[in-house]
Image: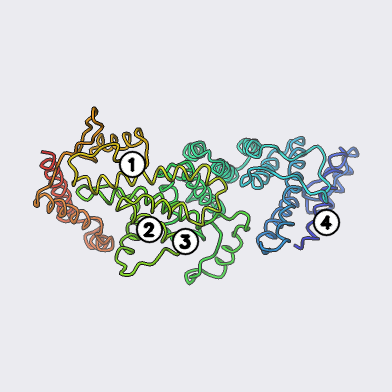
């Protein structure tokens, strides 16, 4: 629908709604046969029935506005002018919701509340309407978009269908996440069990869920919750289809899709003002994975938990490169920062991370996020330094660590004490002198070989081809032979026993 036609329809629907509200005798009914309208008018002289479905027309008007924004070029002024039409349309929906609520048609009221929530959830504030529109009476722009969204959500919870309830919950999670209310958004998602039922939802709800998860991960990252951010963003970044999952682009390789499927996928694309920066998502994930994995990679004599397999593969790939030039992308800059952390150079790592161009998408980066990132980089580099070079020290002064890593005494004491308590660092404090006393624990050659054998045995079990197991199952009547199961159990038991033996001897 052309923009001029849309505006004319908006004016007409506004006039119809005002006439229906002001005239109690005028009733719009959703019937196809005009004879039914005439018969109803003859039966009741106090009412004048008009054929038409006002709620359907308003819903169609909203769909046309969304479709128009999706098709326009964002670099032209027409897109901005078209975007201004959302506020008057929101006020028209509000007026229609109030009218149908007075009529007692609560199912339609839930639909209008859901439409208003779609225009509210991604905004932090609602601008004033343009002067070119005649604003409906008795309605105004909400001062607090989040509170208004909660009111719309409560209406949908009372009278809406399950699909509308699911959508409005995801919209609330999204709205809380962009305001850095991470814990409230996380609790709301966990209480509603969205992650357990989203696979059975419609594609539109799945796309909105992916977008909410992305904002949840970014919200955790902005608060310095590195582990939570990495967990939220891992599936999105690891899929290598982040644009398709966020409905911000179509797949280049669509051989396995029919023309109808491609057409439906293009219809579900988001307008540009709803896009989330995929570069920012990838950078946040890689930085989170770097801060978690680099200290773990330095613990060579233990069996650390694997946080990000993709990040380790990226590090291995760059370490095998013969010639290494200066970083040209955000990913290469983060890898360079990780390599600097491995040798204890926190200043270089900090310069690479803070200097990323992707931070231009974050308004409050310098005031809120940069100090948290600097502290996290220094603390994790401290842990990496102690893991890598602790075996060369007999004692290490706390003042020396303060000079190297530019951290306060309490910060270093907290990090090192946690490492000691969790048995990550074989050392103890000499409180009077403020010195870390390292306990020399060198595993023997046999213990090192035993740990390597245990790792290899675990890898054999993890990398067992599932197709071969399925073939075994088919040939044996749907049951894996006992000999195969016993072999796997023996490998697991032996590897566990060897690891425990080596660990106990090392402690002795």
Asked whether disc 2 touches disc 3, contact meaning CB atoms under 8 Å apart, the reply is no
Please state, as top left, top right, bottom left or bottom right, where the C terminus lies in the image. Answer: top left
Q: Position of residue 427 (x, y in %)?
A: 20, 37
Q: Which mark is residue 241?
A: 3
Sequence order check, earlier mark of 1 and 2: 2
**SS for dot 1:** helix
Question: Looking at the image, which is closer to me, 481 or 204?
Answer: 204
**SS for dot 4:** helix
Question: Marks 3/1: CA distance?
Answer: 44 Å
Question: Marks 1/2: CA distance?
Answer: 26 Å
Please state, as top left, top right, bottom left or bottom right, where the N terminus lies in the image. Answer: bottom right
Q: How many marks?
A: 4
Q: Position of residue 478 (x, y in %)?
A: 26, 57
Q: Which residue is mark 1?
A: 403
Q: Nearer the viewer, mark 4 or mark 2?
A: 2
Q: Nearer the viewer, mark 4 or mark 1?
A: 1
């Amino acid at each position: 629908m052309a923009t001029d036609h849309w505006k004319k329809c908006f004016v007409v629907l506004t006039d119809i709604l005002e006439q229906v509200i002001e005239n109690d005798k005028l009733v719009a009914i959703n019937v196809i046969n005009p004879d039914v309208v005439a018969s109803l008018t003859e039966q009741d002289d106090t009412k004048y029935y008009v054929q038409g479905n006002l709620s359907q027309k308003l819903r169609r008007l909203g769909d046309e506005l969304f479709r128009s924004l999706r098709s326009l070029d964002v670099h032209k002024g027409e897109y901005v002018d078209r975007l201004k039409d959302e506020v008057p349309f929101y006020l028209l929906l509000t007026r229609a919701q109030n009218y149908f609520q007075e009529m007692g048609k609560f199912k339609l009221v839930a639909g209008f509340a859901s439409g208003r929530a779609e225009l509210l959830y991604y905004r932090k504030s609602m601008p004033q309407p343009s002067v070119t529109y005649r604003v409906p009476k008795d309605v105004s722009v909400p001062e607090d978009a989040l509170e208004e969204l909660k009111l719309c959500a409560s209406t949908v919870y009372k009278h809406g269908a399950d699909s509308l309830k699911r959508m409005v919950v995801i919209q609330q999670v999204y709205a809380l996440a962009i305001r850095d209310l991470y814990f409230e958004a996380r609790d709301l998602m966990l209480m509603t069990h969205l992650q357990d039922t989203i696979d059975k939802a419609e594609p539109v709800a799945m796309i909105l869920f992916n977008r909410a998860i992305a904002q949840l991960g970014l919200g955790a990252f902005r608060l310095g919750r590195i582990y939570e951010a990495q967990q939220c963003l891992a599936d999105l970044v690891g899929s290598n289809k982040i644009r398709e999952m966020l409905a911000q682009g179509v797949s280049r390789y669509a051989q396995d899709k029919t023309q109808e499927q491609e057409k439906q996928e293009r219809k579900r694309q988001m307008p540009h003002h709803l896009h989330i920066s995929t570069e920012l998502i990838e950078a946040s994930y890689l930085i989170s994975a770097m801060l978690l994995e680099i200290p773990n990679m330095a613990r060579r004599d233990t069996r650390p938990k694997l946080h990000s397999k993709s990040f380790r593969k990226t590090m291995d790939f760059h370490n095998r490169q013969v010639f290494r030039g200066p970083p040209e992308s955000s990913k290469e800059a983060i890898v360079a920062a990780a390599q600097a952390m491995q040798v204890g150079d926190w200043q270089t790592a900090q310069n690479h991370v803070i200097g990323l161009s992707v931070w231009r998408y974050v308004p409050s980066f310098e005031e809120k996020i940069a100090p948290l990132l600097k502290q996290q980089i220094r603390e994790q580099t401290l842990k990496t330094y102690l893991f890598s070079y602790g075996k060369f020290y007999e004692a290490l002064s706390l003042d020396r660590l303060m000079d190297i890593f530019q951290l306060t005494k309490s910060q270093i004491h907290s990090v090192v004490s946690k490492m000691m308590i969790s048995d990550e660092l074989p050392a103890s404090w000499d409180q009077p002198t403020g010195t870390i006393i390292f306990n020399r624990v060198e595993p023997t050659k046999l213990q090192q070989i035993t740990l390597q054998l245990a790792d290899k045995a675990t890898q054999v079990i993890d990398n067992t081809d599932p197709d071969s197991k399925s073939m075994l199952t088919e040939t044996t009547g749907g049951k894996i032979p006992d000999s195969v199961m016993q072999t796997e159990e023996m490998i697991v038991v032996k590897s566990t026993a060897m690891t425990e033996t080596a660990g106990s001897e090392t402690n002795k």
